[in-house]
């Protein structure tokens, strides 16, 4: 399943610069894409337009042959189930245990008051435990999410995202809150998961070295436009400076 963004633009208010402008991008299964750019370049907006957490002002988001910007609510929720998302702040429910946090991923529409492990079907609990095993923390299933380290919390969030067996993993700065060693381990895990199912993975990263080490393709954004699109090898120091406008101000 291919993801295609066609002439995508986003303007948050009526005034000011657009956050994204004229984005054309096609991403195929198997691609592990890192999105780079300085603060405010539009990275978060781009990631969030893909699953319509942010609604684009114009243009198309074509997933599995359908334009999600004009999809019905039902079509959109089906598409969203195919798109797992992880965040910089992990977005877990701190007072609840790890297992419950993962189970929530299988029932995105469930109200929070129903999030009691005993109420989940056995099959879902087994799947959640499998997901926790996959990310290496099944032994923490009964611990409260807020008691875990950042790296462990991000593993819980990845397990939660895996519950719906997504075709795309989207990450909005998923390792920005982690120390360098944990960041690398989380990217190793995401790469292994990526390869297992020939998924699409698209992550915003702040660290160019990490992007070069893990991604198969790098997109550079500046002022809401794509200013670089190529392999890690083709991202020269000069290109890097151009993306970050190093020396301009
Ligand atoms: N909810 C919002 N309302 C208004 N403007 C916004 C909103 N979100 C982002 N913007 C603006 O859109 C532009 C792009 O922001 P975005 O968060 O996508 O950039 P970014 O590259 O992810 O930045 P950072 O690396 O700092 O997170 C910025 O000018 C930002 O101020």
Image: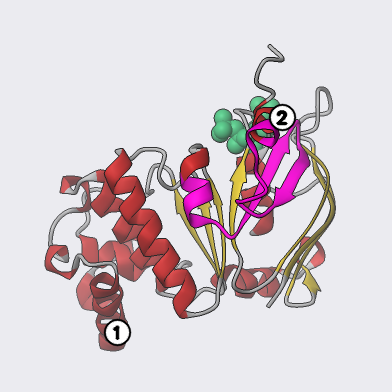
Start-end of magenta stretch: 210-239
Give whichever of 68, 21 is nearer the camera.
21
**Membership of 132 in magenta stretch:** no
Residue farthest toward the top in the current orientation of the protein:
249
Give left or right: position of 233 versus 2. Answer: left
- Cβ of mark 2 under 8 Å from ligand 1: the answer is no
Q: Dividing the image into four equal quarters, which quarter contains ligand 1?
A: top right
Label of residue 242 in the image: 2
Q: Residue 122: x and y, percent?
A: 25, 86
At numbered mark 1, what does the secondary structure look like: helix, strand or loop? loop
Specify the label residue 121 is tagged with. 1
Q: Where is residue 25 shown, x and y percent of the image? A: 78, 57
Residue appearing at x 22%, y 67% in the figure: 136
The residues tagged by marks 1 and 2 sit, at their Cα atoms, a distance apart of 52 Å
Quarter holding residue 81: bottom right
Residue at 59%, 60% (x, y): give it: 216
């Amino acid at each position: 399943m291919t993801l295609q963004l066609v002439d995508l633009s986003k303007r948050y208010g009526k005034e000011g610069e657009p956050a994204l402008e004229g984005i054309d991008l096609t991403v195929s299964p198997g691609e592990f894409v890192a999105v780079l750019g300085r603060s405010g370049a539009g990275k978060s907006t781009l990631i969030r337009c893909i699953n319509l957490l942010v609604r684009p002002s114009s243009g198309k988001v074509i997933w599995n042959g359908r334009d999600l910007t004009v999809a019905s609510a039902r079509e959109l929720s089906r598409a969203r189930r195919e798109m797992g998302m992880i965040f910089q702040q992990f977005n877990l429910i701190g007072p609840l245990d790890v297992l419950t946090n993962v189970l929530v991923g299988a029932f995105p529409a469930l109200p929070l008051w129903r999030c009691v492990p005993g109420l989940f079907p056995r099959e879902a609990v087994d799947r959640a435990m499998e997901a926790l095993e996959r990310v290496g923390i099944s032994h923490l299933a009964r611990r409260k999410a807020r008691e875990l380290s950042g790296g462990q919390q991000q593993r819980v969030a990845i397990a939660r995202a895996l519950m719906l067996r997504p075709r795309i993993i989207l990450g909005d700065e998923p390792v920005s809150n982690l120390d360098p060693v944990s960041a690398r381990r989380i990217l190793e895990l995401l790469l292994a998961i990526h390869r297992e199912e020939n998924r699409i993975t698209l992550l915003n990263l702040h660290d160019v070295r990490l992007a070069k080490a893990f991604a198969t393709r790098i997109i550079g954004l500046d002022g809401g436009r794509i200013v670089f699109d190529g392999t890690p090898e083709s991202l020269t120091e000069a290109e890097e400076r151009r993306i970050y406008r190093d020396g301009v101000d």
